[in-house]
Amino acid sequence: MKIPMVDLKQQYTHLKTEIDSAVLSVLDSAHFILGPNVKALAAEVAQYCNVKHAIPVASGTDAIHLALLACGIGVGDEVITTPFTFIGTAEAISYTGAKPVFVDIEADSFNIDTTQIEAAITPQTRAIAAVHLFGQPANLDALTELCRRHDLRLIEDCAQSFGARYDDRMTGSFGDVGCFSFYPSKNLGAYGDAGMVITNNDTIAEKVDVLHNHGSDAPYKHSVIGYNSRLDEIQAAILRIKLKYIDEFNNARREHARHYSERLANSDIITPVEQDNRMHVYHQYTIRSERRDAIHKALTEADIASAVFYPIPLHQQPVYQNDYPGLSMPVAEQTAKQVLSLPMFPELTNAQIDHICDVMLGCLGSE
Ligand SMILES: Cc1ncc(COP(=O)(O)O)c(C=O)c1O
């Protein structure tokens, strides 16, 4: 039984009538940039996340970059973040001229270890860019408290956590600014690159709005050097359809996670924990095992996809390693050797999950 990591085709097939009609109506309107769908999507996401402002942008990386710029981050500044994330989080910090300062992660949640942040704060520290990795919110109580006490900005990288809640509030609504990616395989995914910045801060919203459209605050008047980072109407129309189903999709992911965890419970595979007061949305279902490579091989041989997110922590990436000589992040480094993400998408079936677990348990038993 061939099982992919994600099955975007199946989701499109279910929503085809609605999506085709939304795309055709954009084509028919011939209004492709900064049109009614982009405006409506911004209002709908702001309402869903219960924030004042949402600014659609071209990607998740752009969302973080523009958010940092709007928070005044630049050359000479330091931004604390996690070494165990997609490169986009750190890249966006580097674009501004600031330095990413890595703080190790918690072994159980894979998120930044907030108990180690204070020791990394220097007079140059201006912000924390926290990631809600794999769909589980980071410790937002600790993060907001640290930022308040040290006068730092909190940027939430919610690329993997659309719809995830902490204390019943949406991720992205706790910090000064929240940043989403709508990359196709994300929980809320477009059919191309797309992203969004959300905030309750009027000044940040205005700055991102200007920056994302060539620094323009009135037609053909340019007050700063900005960027071309607009979300287009076709992607916005598609996202508006999918947004209606996001809770259903996330609940299906949570059901699948429960089924996986039940099946793998009596083995030496470490299944994901869902921490208190948090609603995990399982962008990835990621297990840990000392025998990760054997499991990965057995799954591949059975035609089942699985993936290592992420094999190299950021401080050890070729692009950054010379900037952090001798830096040791023991938990992130060990985690990178043990994690394996299993197929996860709303349309996955219990029969598929059972088959995946049978292959995994069989391989461990036969070693
Ligand atoms: C944690 C994280 N941050 C940032 C990004 C960057 O988003 P994008 O690919 O839309 O630029 C991604 C996803 O790709 C991500 O998973």
Image (cartoon, helix red, strand yellow):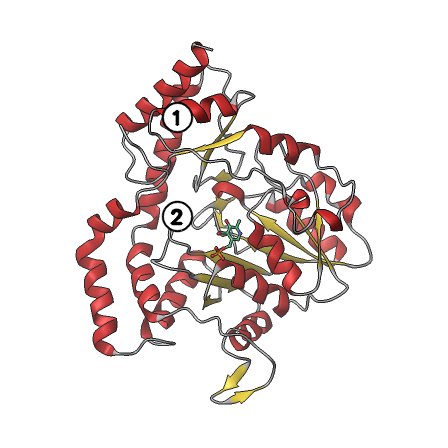
Q: Residue at x 53, y 31 (%)?
A: 339
Q: Pinpoint residue 312: horizontal percent, then vertical percent.
A: 60, 40
Residue where numbered disc 2 is placed: 187
Q: State whether label 2 is within 8 Å of ligand 1.
A: no
Residue where numbered disc 1 is placed: 299
Up/down of 167 relative to 41, above or below: above
- At label 1, which amino acid type do we have? Leu
Up/down of 55 relative to 103, above or below: below
Under circle 2, the secondary element is loop
Q: Residue at x 66, y 32 (%)?
A: 331
Under circle 1, the secondary element is helix
Mark 1–mark 2 CB contact (< 8 Å): no
The one nearer the camera, 324 or 58, is 324
Q: How crowded is mark 1: few (under 14 residues within 10 Å), some or many (20 or more)?
A: many
Q: Residue at x 58, y 63 (%)?
A: 65
Q: State whether label 1 is within 8 Å of ligand 1.
A: no
Q: How crowded is mark 2: few (under 14 residues within 10 Å), some or many (20 or more)?
A: many
Q: Which residue is drawn at 41% across and 67% down?
A: 42
Up/down of 85 relative to 73, above or below: above
Q: Pinpoint residue 51: horizontal percent, then vertical percent.
A: 48, 62
- Can residue 136 be seen in the rendering of this structure? no
- Can residue 145 be seen in the rendering of this structure? yes
Left or right: where does residue 275 sit relative to residue 185? right
In the rendered image, which quarter contains the N terminus?
top left
